Amino acid sequence: MDHAQAQSQDLFDVLVVGAGPAGLMAAEQAARAGIRVAVAEAMPSPARKFLMAGKSGLNLTKAEDPDAFLQHFDAIAPLKPILSEFGPAEVIGFAEGLGQKVFTGSTGRVFPTRMKASPLLRAWLVRLDALGVTLLRHHRWIGPLTTHAQHLFDTPKGKVTLTAEALILALGGASWARLGSDGAWHTPVAAAGVPIIPVQASNVGMQRAWSDHMQPFFGQPVKNVELTVLGQKSRSEFVITQYGVEGGAIYALGRMLRQTPMARIDFAPQLSTRILGDMISNRKPKDSLSNFLRKSVKLDATKRALLFELTRPIPCDAEGLVAAIKAAPLQVLGPRPMDEAISTAGGISWDALTPELMLWDFPGVFCAGEMLDWDAPTGGYLITACLATGRWAGHAAADYISAKALT
């Protein structure tokens, strides 16, 4: 599958740029049509961000009803047909087809039994090799974006030109630059007049200044809480950090937190307002507030510290205390730097793309993966959409080649 140095005479039907999940899936789909496919990757090895994402457990997808799954994306209309063809069930079948057994956790998240990404990637590369896909390492696409069949790349041995009838760009977002997703593709794509929605950090921690009182709780999880932002709710957990907050509950509401800096925390979602009010009204006079919150409301030390931090001074009356526990104000100061983000929102505008993910103004050039303008939280949604859009673009590119052969 490897090809150390491409020369100008190398000819392919489809050239995929980017060897992440979207690019590899595009290459596989195109290769299954029996055409010549190459994948050009700027880094020394493929799928580095994919491997890093799987270090703590590769969350492939979410075992969820397709309609409910789709609601976690902001670009529902253009993604609906794509995810309808390749959604959670198909991702599971894909992994199992590579010999990777999976299991579904208590929250519906799906993981390989071996947890890591590397066994799946190794099996996938073997399959791509068997399909005749050529992997070109150290090949950085430098543009310009063109409808011509020749495409220019920087390599350790200088610039080379690769020839292909169709080009699939799967260049990722703009986070984790050290792993290859540096967003450098924006320059040649924007120079060609393709509209790009400004990129923003997504699935990233939010900043907040803490008092010294919170220092002992840095790194501690805040579990079993419900966050609300602009009417959207997330019942999960997050972590208090030196710079603010991060974790699943924060990521799930990231789009809303980019619109407003205010979230509300329900520290006791298991208790209704009425029941909590009765508990407070019946609190024993000698029972300290901290002890009452610990024993009766079941708030651990981290929750109590955060409650006191966010609601200083803590209300003394029953109504005020209920409001503090059920809707404590968490004001943030914006996201952490983009390169710390798990993913990025924004990218190539859907208006620039045909339903087949081909650029209207550049026939034969297709786009896939995180470089498209869509956003979703962690939990299996990101990888699924990358695989699905890659598959869609690969199939469309193969159809494009077939149609050209008939003319």
Image (cartoon, rainbow, N blue to C red):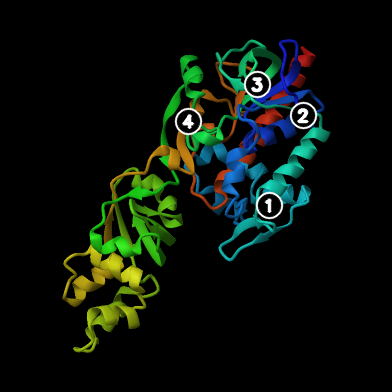
The residue type indicated by label 1 comes to Ala
Tell us which disc is closer to us: 1 or 3.
3
Q: Residue 167 shows which numbered tag?
A: 3
Kindly identify the amino acid type of the residue bearing the numbered disc 2.
Answer: Val
Indicate left or right for 377 with 261 as reference.
right
Which mark is first along the chain, 2 or 1? 1
Residue picked out by circle 4: 347
Looking at the picture, does residue 387 appear above or below residue 187? Answer: below
- Along the viewing direction, whichever of 234 and 204 lies nearer the viewer: 204
* SS for callout 2: loop
Between marks 3 and 2 in the image, the one whose residue lies nearer the viewer: 2
Q: Residues within 10 Å of mark 1 (few under 14, many from 20)?
A: some
Residue at 48% x, 37% y is: 175
Left or right: 270 with respect to 173? left
**Distance CA(mark 1)–CA(mark 3):** 29 Å
- C-alpha span from label 4 to label 1: 27 Å
Quadrant of the drawing holding the C terminus = top right
- Residue tagged by mark 1? 89
Residue 133's mark? 2
